[in-house]
Image (cartoon, rainbow, N blue to C red):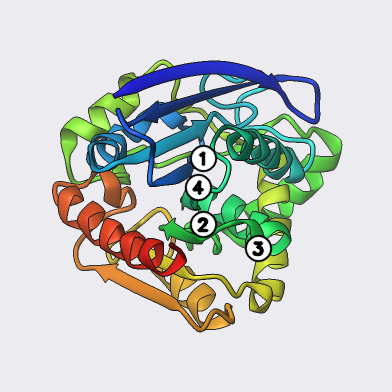
Amino acid sequence: MKHQEGYFKSNRATNIFYQYWLPDEEPKAILLVVHGLAEHSGRYMNLVNHFVPSGYAVYGIDQIGHGKSDGKRVYVERFEDFTKPLKTYFDTIRTWHPGRPIFLIGHSMGGLISTAYLLEHQNELSGAVLSGPGVKLPDTISRITILAGKILSILVPKAGIAPINYDEISRDQAVVDAYINDPLVYTGKVTARLMAEVIKAINHVTEHAAKIQLPIMIAQGSCDKMVPPSGAQILYERISSKDKTIKFYEGLYHEIFNEPEHEQVLGEVQQWIEKHLNETT
């Protein structure tokens, strides 16, 4: 396995960190991973260690304001500050691997970013896998907090407003401990501007989800306390893809790739990808 990393400039002229893992032979497909809120691309080693030995290349970036990338933590001016660097990175990957199928894998807020990305660029991809997609706000966020976020996003956009309940990411305490102690993970409050932009993005993707027609798999922990499982069902029902799959994993929490059953989850994701890989080759 070969690992490389580097930086490129975002649409805001900030440094965006990227990294990738390559198999020893020419990859049969590319997996482009879009991480979730407050975390970073380095937290997907279960996925890397599962797929790269099977001949896949795994690519990831740290979103602006996350991980090793520049920017105020968990803050964006506009939601497109997530999707535009993703497009830049995608185009670079395409030049590195011309003709190779590319599958988007988005987790949590990365699932929301991925869904927004698909509305503009789905024709360039062979398929997408969305893990616990953040297309619905948690029920624990009150209307008062949402209203305050909208107001503060204009008046004091960088103010912290909503905490992250990181104890609920996984049933594996070792995963939770690693998350808390990871210096690249942000454990403070979400900024008002980011919350406002996420709400706008949720409204946009749910309103226009019918435009999505490419093969898509949605995988969701049934006991996810961070992202409502009902959001995954709503997204599944609204997309127009004739080839769409939804899988609820009974008893699993938010980070299904980091749960004790992650090998089962990743194995089923691989089965889905390889079915569609065979259809495109």
Check whether the beta carbons of the residues at disc 2 and disc 1 lie within 8 A of each other. Answer: yes
Looking at the rendering, which quadrant does residue 76 occupy? top right
Horizontally, residue 111 falls left or right of residue 178, namely right
Q: Residue at image x 37%, y 74%?
A: 246
- Marks 2 and 3 sit apart, C-alpha to C-alpha, by 22 Å
Horizontally, residue 15 falls left or right of residue 5, namely right
The answer to which of 115 and 6 lies nearer the viewer is 6
Q: Position of residue 250 (x, y in %)?
A: 20, 68
The answer to which of 113 and 269 lies nearer the viewer is 269
Residue 37 bears which disc, if any? Answer: 1
Residue type at tag 4: Arg
- Marks 2 and 1 sit apart, C-alpha to C-alpha, by 9 Å
Horizontally, residue 195 falls left or right of residue 33, namely right
| First reached walking from the N terminus: tag 4 or tag 1 | 1
Q: Secondary structure at mark 4?
A: loop
Q: Which residue is label 3 attached to?
A: 123
The answer to which of 156 and 97 lies nearer the viewer is 97
Vertical relation: 50 (above or below) 202: above
Residue 134 bears which disc, if any? Answer: 2
| First reached walking from the N terminus: tag 2 or tag 1 | 1
| First reached walking from the N terminus: tag 2 or tag 4 | 4
Question: Of circles 2 and 4, which is in front?
Answer: 4
Q: Position of residue 139 (x, y in %)?
A: 48, 63
- Marks 4 and 1 sit apart, C-alpha to C-alpha, by 29 Å
Quadrant where the image shows the C terminus: bottom left
Residue 100 bears which disc, if any? Answer: 4
Residue 79 bears which disc, if any? Answer: none
